[in-house]
Amino acid sequence: MRQILCNSSGAIVARMPRPALAPGMVLIRVHYSLVSVGTEIASLRPAVTDVCSSGTPIEKAAAKASLAGRYLGLAARHPDKAVRRICRIVTENTSRLFPAKSDQKVVCSLDNMQWSQCHAEKMESVGGELQIITDDSEYGYQVMSDEIAVPNGCVPIFHIKGRVVEGMVSIGVLDEKKEKWLGARTYDGGVFEDRLIFDPSSSNYVTMVVANAGANRSSTVLLESIEVSHSAPTVNGRALSELGDQGWNVGYSAAGEVITVGEGVMDFKVGDKVTCGGAGLANHADYVSVPRNLVCKIPEGCSMKEAAMTTVGTIALQGVRRAAPQLGERICVIGLGLIGQMTAQLLRAAGCRVVGLDLDPGRVTRAKELGMQAGCQEPDHLKKLVNDLTEGRGADRTIITAATKSDAVVNLAMEVTRVKGTVIIVGDVGLGVQRQHFYRKEIDLLMSTSYGPGRYDRQYEAEGQDYPFSYVRWTLNRNMQAFMELISLQRINIEALIDKVTHVDSAPATYTELAKGEGTQPLAVLIHYPEDGLRYREEEASPKITIGGHRPTPNGPLRYALVGAGAFGTCMLVPQMSKRKDRFFLKAVVSRDAIRGGNFARANQVEIFASELDEVLADSSIDFVVISTRHSEHANQVIASIKAGKHVFVEKPLALSWDELDRVNQAYVGLKEPPLVMVGFNRRFAPAINALRVETSQRRSPLIINYRLNGGYIPLDHWIQTAQGGGRNIGEACHMYDLFRSLTAAPVVAVNAAAISPGTLPYLPNDNFCATLTYDDGSVANLVYTALGPKQGLGKERIEVFCDGEAYLVDDFKSLVRSSDNKVLWHSEVVDKGHFEELTRFGDAIAGLCDVPIPWGEIIETTAVSLLIEDQIFGRIYSDEEY
């Protein structure tokens, strides 16, 4: 499907997998979506107006730094998106501002390409390969090829093979003038094979460059071969390379028809015409998957185009509800953009007389044509108008729908509002309220939050728990319904606010035009997704796509799919596996988050991006899956994966309940030749623990183990504390139980646990408890797990092990010390909890080089221990038969 994204270059149409359908969700084929001309376009203006197109290199670099600042500003709303974009701006865009160095030295040949030495310490042909030893500059150009001709209308493709022996380098392509990068890729240690496909723009010639990549030290790279070919920029209507189609999603108000509904949704059926809302949900895309409480049926008499504006209309309606206007009241509206226009109409429909202010005289005129009694564009004129229309008393209520950082707007509202009146803030304005009018008039200042009650409430929005009608008459969903009913009854004229309707394929040009800000800005712009005009075939609306320009799949390494593109999977597991390029190759990413997953997949040149797990389980080219989703999904995903014959690495925990554990175990033992399953109990593989295991391998006595974990406080509404996470005992303390099992090398025979009684304080028993485990060899292990301690001043994890008259201390997985002589048996400057070792051993086990790192029986036992301790913490007592 097509989805509109925004990035530093403007708006693009990216190809995405169709959204997955989850319980409580509604899958919608979008017909129209509304562009928020204010919020969506504002962040594009610096990029589209090309602030870096002129000036000295230093001035241009400063402009790029300003653009990076723009992304830092967005980071609060889009942290996962902003980080990668900032890195790209700083390391790529700024470096392309400076011309290539020309003091070339040695000339060598590789595959009929001539290469010249720039700042490399050494360049020579060795056994048919080109060896390059770089200098220690940060981003200096090291070697350059001769110019490569680009046939008219073609895109060059560079198929490169090589090996980074030491350090890190960038290999990229310069434009014809050698003034900027057309694109570049970075390679660190190990073998690489890649295809560089970058748009040459207007260049008739391009040049390949090997440069340093910020390592600030010398690097060594061997180029084995470089094959150059050319192709048309598109194949069957698709771009040759889609790797650059990254950005953040936009849109939050849409309308279309129901394709299917998820489990638990009972009041929608296929074919229903609906409107939907929600940032990050009701996106500009052919298909969207939206929670039930953010979806509403379109009544008769309300067109699909009008319904697409419902989310914004609901913001206006909630502002009016907060104002609680009475028949005949005089109400002032400051800001006559789209929300202000709707607000004025809603007030008029409620029997109020409305006076408005906007700096754009055209918007004032438009509002008056649609029923507003009076309006102006000057604040002083507004004061006079309000004074005349209210017999000198002031407006009963003032609704602010403007957007400005200035405090002048809110203070103007105070000035024009009557004694004991009300000011309602809907727009994003400065809140430096002056005391004079606020105090003397005893004005009520109210904030209106988005669409109404239920907004930002996870239980309402994501979990579908409605508020009782008798107690909360107007929820956000009922507000949506009421707004469309006003349209159908012709009490408000919303179609008159629609200034432009553009085809989805023309959306980037429309965004560029809007970002220029020339002429009269439209109020409402709709994007249309006509079925007859779909550029992609119907099968392209599938849950899986192949990304154009992806890395070739090498022979040898195990091909895996990352399931879940959250922080732990993308920032911990994948980087650790990337250190073993000889063993692992990331071939697919599965994520319901099209932006986070899509950006990650494209940035890493992944071949397959899917929104549903079944798509990769049915792919015979995938050897195993790495599951890094929310804990509540692990059990079902493991069962589906092993039944499909895929090896599984699943981040802990394996299961959140006895039922889940039983179903996973039954699925595993029921297979004649089950695939390998590994749970991410990484601490047993930490170097400190490996060294400790060696020290105690010849012990005569049982072990006494004291493990203190100072976990730090996590709010009660954090996902890890909810049904998705299962709490910190099951979700994290399982690490400790596995470590105990590994050190004792004996099965557990008794478990006892006790937790705090927090009373009314905001703490949970299952992240503040003590557990004692007794093992078959006589060993005893104690765990103190607490969230009551400080996040600074005390390390997170400390392990003391006693046996045979000796004691050993592991401090935060950075050191192992033998207490009797204070000898440091192992030390590291950085924390090493064994992630690389566990993944390496699991890969070797799949390859048949060693046994499975953790036997299945131990995985089941550790999970069962965590569940039993959870029962004891919360006082749940079962009979032996029930266990």
Image: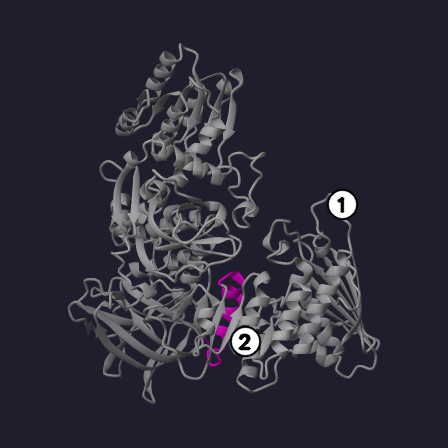
Q: Amino acid at mark 1?
A: Gly
Q: Which mark is residue 445?
A: none
Q: Which residue is mark 1?
A: 759
Q: Nearer the viewer, mark 1 or mark 2?
A: 2
Q: How many marks?
A: 2
Q: Residue furthest left?
A: 152
Residue 674: which quarter of the image?
Answer: bottom right
**Secondary element at image label 2:** helix
* Residue plotted at (27% across, 72% down): 208
Vertical relation: 820 (above or below) 852: above
**Residue 643 disc label:** 2
Quadrant where the N terminus sits is bottom left
Taking 816 as reference, is 704 left or right?
right
Crowd around label 1: few <14 · some 14–19 · many ≥20 (10 Å): few
Q: Position of residue 222 (x, y in %)?
A: 37, 81
Image position of 285 with respect to 860: above or below? above
- What residue is rendered at 25% in x and 62% in y? 179
Q: As rendered, which of 403 and 163 lies closer to the eye?
A: 403
Choose top left, top right, bottom left or bottom right for residue 835. bottom right
Spatial CA distance of label 1 from label 2 is 45 Å
Q: Does 579 lie within the magenta span?
A: yes
Find residue 195 and report its horizontal and vertical position in percent.
32, 74
Amino acid marked by disc 2: Lys
- The extreme top residue here reads 391
Q: Residue at x 30, y 77 (%)?
A: 159
Along the polypeptide, which appears first: circle 1 or circle 2? 2
- Percent from the top left, x then y, of residue 343? 39, 30
Q: Residue at horizontal 43%, vertical 27%?
A: 399
Range of magenta residues: 565-585
**Relative side of 837 to 865, left or right:** left
